[in-house]
Amino acid sequence: MSDEKQQRLTAWWAAIFLCVLGLCLTFLARDESVVELAADLLGCRTREPVPVKLASQPTQPSINCSLPIGQSVFPGSCELLQNVCLDQGTVILYGPQYRPANGNGPPIDLPTLEPVGRQKTFYLQYWHRDNIHMKQGLPPLKVRPASATEARQYLAEPSFSSCTVPVVFYQHNSFNFAHTLRDNAARFYSALKETAWEQHAKVVLMTGGGLPISAMNLALWQPLSNMSVDSMADFSVRLPDEQIGRRPPGRAQPPTFEGVEKRCFQTMFVCLHDIATANWQLHAYGQQVVRYYGGQKLGRTVPEAGPPGQQKSAGVPPPESILRQLGKVPIVPASASTRGEGGRNGSEPSGEEEQILQIVFQKRAGEDRQLVNAADLVKACNTWRFSAPSGARVRALCWELELSSLEVGIAAAQQADIFVGAHGANIANAWLMRPGSSVVELTMFGFDDNPPHMHLAYRNSLDKDTQVQFWKLLLCDRNGSWTPGTREKHELAAGKSGDPSWPKYRNLIVRWQSLRTVLEAVVETGGDMLQYRQRWAVGRWWWLSGANQAAVYGGPQREMTCTKALREGLVD
């Protein structure tokens, strides 16, 4: 073979080798840009690169929805935006009204999406520490017009979803269980119930600094929606183009109504302040949370919430509190009815059977707002006997319990007929109780000078459909009804005096005689909401407890305080 032929053969084998190498790079790289670069460098491209097949699920076909957006309370309380995309915490506006018609210049009439007042609150807990930055706050939601150089194809040529309506909500005091339940999630739930397109609303919560939604917040918000509840930071993460329109793997709830990843929407709302609703459905929202987490069956799965000694035998409680049975004809044991011992033909009750009220004394976590004489109160409560107006005889099964988690709170609320606890976030567990139940809120000495001490009971009164009754006992014995909280104790030792924040954290000492007065009123009302609202109207739902005398009614104006009552001689 001549040298020339040998050189041609060598060049031919070299070309084959380089093309095979290119195909190998194609297989290994799995990236179109790398493949094209390799082909160009090797000089053996013969056709367009073979597209890489993705392992994810196929793109779902698009669907269209015609939603009556105006049939909702959201347009009256929140900012309406149309034809938007979300990208890295920013709302991109595609409407032509935001761009100058001719020439260069700044955008026109961009909406200002800044929260007002308490909606700005957000606490930052420091890394590896227990301390917090209480002034972290929530920033305005960033907006900009669409650009000619968007970073993704789905932003450059958006397909706006008509079936998912994101509602971005600025919470206030989202660190607090009661505020989250009462002022944020329950109010949003009420708005959804007054919205014709409830199932299409996507809950998006604002958080500070791109942080995730806290576990407590998510637990209270997720029951509102079949879609995942996401932070704005998470719901606006920039995705690869191929993930848009695909189902995300490993998620318990779908991210959108369509069930696939979306970033662009025909309609979106941003709620910068409280939402105005026709009704504030606190108890209905609480029952929604209960159903979401297993309802009355939680008494079995969380036995530690039950009474001591009976935790393993906890059954499913009836759907309503036993209090509602007390206003009816007394129940007779089946054995008595079959023997005819109840009266004519055995059809009339004897009134001898005792009905058992389950009363849970809430124990707070931490050192403050503790019920100092809880053991004595539980002991007295377990020996208490009373007769309802119907003739039904009542005794109590009482125990103290720390509501250490939402699950424990639900399990306890579904077993208890009556909660007794110090003013604070724990009292909000009352909205997780069965219809006809009651909560007795104890107010620390001196804290009643602050109007917020009435907020829980008053908010419940605004719920037209609530089936839980709030009762209140103010502790007015200036010497014997309290001990200082942790900070008050330390600051008193350091010589400080008169801090108005001290009373909120004081510990409580409650006279059994005063608490018994409240419990008797609860039994006499029998879970009847009409009777309770009549009591509310005349101020016979709350009391002031002095040192020795019987507790006195607070009155209809909700303005009486221990300071006034002591000055006027109403309590000793």
Image (spheres, grey):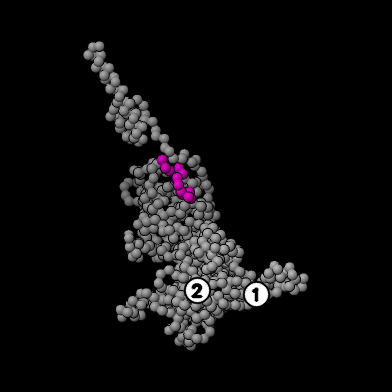
**Residue occupying the far top of the picture:** 1
Task: Identify which residue is drawn at 69% across, 70% down.
Answer: 332
**Residue occupying the far bottom of the picture:** 569
Q: Quadrant of the N terminus?
A: top left
Q: Is residue 433 left or right of residue 347?
A: left
The x and y percentages for residue 441 are 50, 73
Task: Identify which residue is drawn at 59% across, 74% down.
Answer: 395
Q: Which badge, 2 or 1, comes first in the chain's sequence?
A: 1
Q: With respect to residue 118, does 163 lie above or below? A: above
Of the pair 33 and 302, the residue shown nearer to us: 302
Task: Identify which residue is drawn at 49% across, 71% down.
Answer: 400
Residue picked out by circle 2:
441
Of the pair 318 and 425, the residue shown nearer to us: 318
Q: Nearer the viewer, mark 2 or mark 1?
A: 1
Q: With respect to residue 454, does 179 lie above or below? A: above
Q: Which residues are magenta?
A: 242-256
Of the pair 125 and 353, the residue shown nearer to us: 353
Q: With respect to residue 336, does 544 lie above or below? A: below
Residue picked out by circle 1:
392
- Kind of residue at disc 2: Glu
Task: Specify few, some or many for label 2: CA neighbours under 10 Å numbering under 14, 14-19, or 20 or more.
Answer: many
Does the magenta run of residues contain 475? no
